Image (cartoon, rainbow, N blue to C red):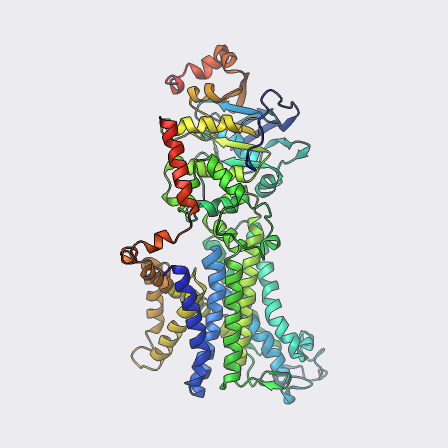
Amino acid sequence: MTYRTASIIAYIAFFAVVLALPLVLNSFWTNRVAIYLVYSICAIGISMSWGYAGILSLGQGLFFGMGAYMLAMSLTLAVPENNPVPQLMLLNMEPNAVRDLCCVTTGSFLWIPFRSVAVGMIAGIVVPCILAAAIGYVMFKRRTTGVYVSIITLAFAVIGQLLIINNQPLTGGFNGLADLALLEIGGFEFDPYGPSAYYAVALTLIAVILLARYMLTGRIGQVLKAIREDEARARYLGYDVENYKLFIFCVSAGVAGLAGMLFTVTSEFATPSLMATSLSISMVIWAATGGRASLLGACIGALIVNFVGSLASESATFQPVWPIILGLLFVVVVLFMPNGIAGIFKAFIDRPGKAERLGGAKLSGKTERPDKADLLVKSELSAREA
Amino acid sequence: MNAVHRPSQAGAVSTAPILRTQNLTVRFDEFPAVRDVDLSIADGELRVIIGANGAGKSTLLDLLCGKTLPSEGEIWLRDRNITGIGEAAIARSGVGRKFQTPTVFKDMTVLENLQVASNRRVRVFENLFERVKGRPSDKEVAVAERTGLLGSMKRKASELSHGQLQWLELAMVLSQEPKIILLDEPAAGMTAAETDKTAELLLDLAGGHTVLVIEHDMAFVRRICRTITVMHQGAVLAEGTAEEIERNPAVIEAYLGSATLSHA
Ligand SMILES: Nc1ncnc2c1ncn2[C@@H]1O[C@H](COP(=O)(O)OP(=O)(O)O)[C@@H](O)[C@H]1O
Ligand SMILES: [Mg+2]
């Protein structure tokens, strides 16, 4: 079996398991796994930018959090008690302010478009993309690379989190947005503990994987790989490296924003902790564990790490040391298995000794062209030597 | 006949310069690595630049391909001023560069390297829905055949020998279909047989392509060359045929008499 066949089988098996899980899970676990699948989408975003383009963003939580907040704002306004003005603003307004979204607190007008849930959903992807475009433009046009990209993105996430915390009258501050309405589209309600929200997440995940795979196995992926290896070389071949980086960085931010929205749907809150450095770094650990250059690997990495993490959090012994374990896991993965679980899978499929057992069938099944060409070149060389 | 190999028209070389530099100068902390270079390369010409180590040859190519910004002077490709427009734009306008130490994408196969190089639709949105073919196009086969890489199409670049890496980078530059090819010591580190093949390849390119090649080895230079430009301490010292250069007293004093090249 070639690696390609094996990975297609792995993808199909993964999709099948994901789609079948709600049949065997209770409502508590349906919700839990849905949230893990949201994290898987985050890990795919990391894999796209880090695994395929070498851009290690440590501020992915900023985009994730923005996505979550955009939808949470709409779902806040969808609660009847939050009209015409959300409770959180009433608590923080000046004594004689007008009770209208336009001017109840400074900046409250920014909420007006979010009366429409559709706007919230679009903003959940578009706003992170625009934010990433702005940050990315500044970074990449100045040819910032490597660890500096990580530091800058991390700094922006910290700034974003502080802005949310410090603008309590507008954002709900430290407490974030809670007591949200359930997401409802065309009369259909997504119950976070039922199969509806689960399938919204699962189907989005599958769509994201398929689209990302389509894109990354195409020309864009090839150019990004070249850029990751030697961006100067790519420039001398005529590629505007900055634009490619900007593109994948924005797509990755959009994916994170999408995940953030689904987080709001499944968890029913958005808080500044979504933009915390620890979550951004966790996302990188998930992707690294599963295999950053593999979309499916990153996905599975997120599932496994979170599942084990939740088991650990229920144990009195492991709960306090879990962050340490997570940190060590990252070090071990980076040092000893740079391609993570996906790398182990590939090594297993390509393991030596397999070719003999197949009786050379693998070789004869390969394309004929290079073989013929081999002969051609060899005869040409020997002709020259003669 | 293949797509890359255009009929050679030796003797019928047009004289309009394809590449021209004016007062090209670059200083690194006041040290002039390249000084007032006025270069004029005709369409279809095979030009060799020689000079001792540190004469500024590689830096000159760096200026031409945009890797280094000139302190003064201009670079013209036909009637376009390409000074300071950025490496990618310079490459797109038709300058292809091969580096002194081969720079290829080591983690990719030979075919993938050629595909990345030969893709002339380089913008993000042009490539968005573009698929990658598993088999080489006729053009890629032709380039690989020319550089002796046809048998290695599916091999990772990291598995190639040093000589093959040099050819792969040359193949990538050819795939770009540049108006002018800049080669920095293409035979460096090659075995005698490989050097022979490289010389043949360059002669084969001449006429169909405009080539600017830096070379160290005088025997190699005599073999491939028509016009030689001698660089010394960043400036052009002399220009002419091999015989003229070898008779030029200034060149003999500055360069040919020195130990660096006496083995040639
Ligand atoms: N980026 C740089 N910074 C400082 N000095 C440089 C730089 N690049 C080249 N030089 C200097 O310029 C001179 C010419 O170098 P180079 O062009 O590599 O010579 P050549 O290729 O002819 O051997 C050398 O003295 C080298 O040290
Ligand atoms: Mg040099």
**Extreme-bottom residue of the structure:** A81
View quadrant of ligand 2: top left
Residue displayed at 41% across by 72% down = A13
Residue in front for this viewpoint, A124 or A275: A124
Residue in front for this viewpoint, B10 or A315: B10
Q: Is residue B165 left or right of residue A221?
A: left
Quarter of the picture containing the C terminus of chain B is top left
Q: Quadrant of residue A124?
A: bottom right
Does A189 appear above or below B256? below
Q: Is residue A262 left or right of residue B164?
A: right
Q: Quadrant of residue B27?
A: top right
Does A322 appear above or below A224? below
Count of numbered labels shown in the rendering = 0
Does B216 appear above or below A288? above
Q: Position of residue B124 (x, y in %)?
A: 59, 53
Residue displayed at 47% across by 45% down = B113
Q: Position of residue B77 (x, y in %)?
A: 64, 32
**Can residue A56 be seen in the rendering of this structure?**
no
Residue displayed at 30% across by 55% down = A355
**Can residue B229 be seen in the rendering of this structure?**
yes
Q: Is residue B17 left or right of residue A357?
A: right
Q: Quadrant of residue A297?
A: bottom left
Q: Position of residue B246 (x, y in %)?
A: 48, 13
Q: Position of residue B221 (x, y in %)?
A: 46, 21
Residue in front for this viewpoint, A222 or A142: A222
Quarter of the picture containing the N terminus of chain B is top right
Residue in front for this viewpoint, A265 or B183: B183
Does A18 appear above or below A291? below
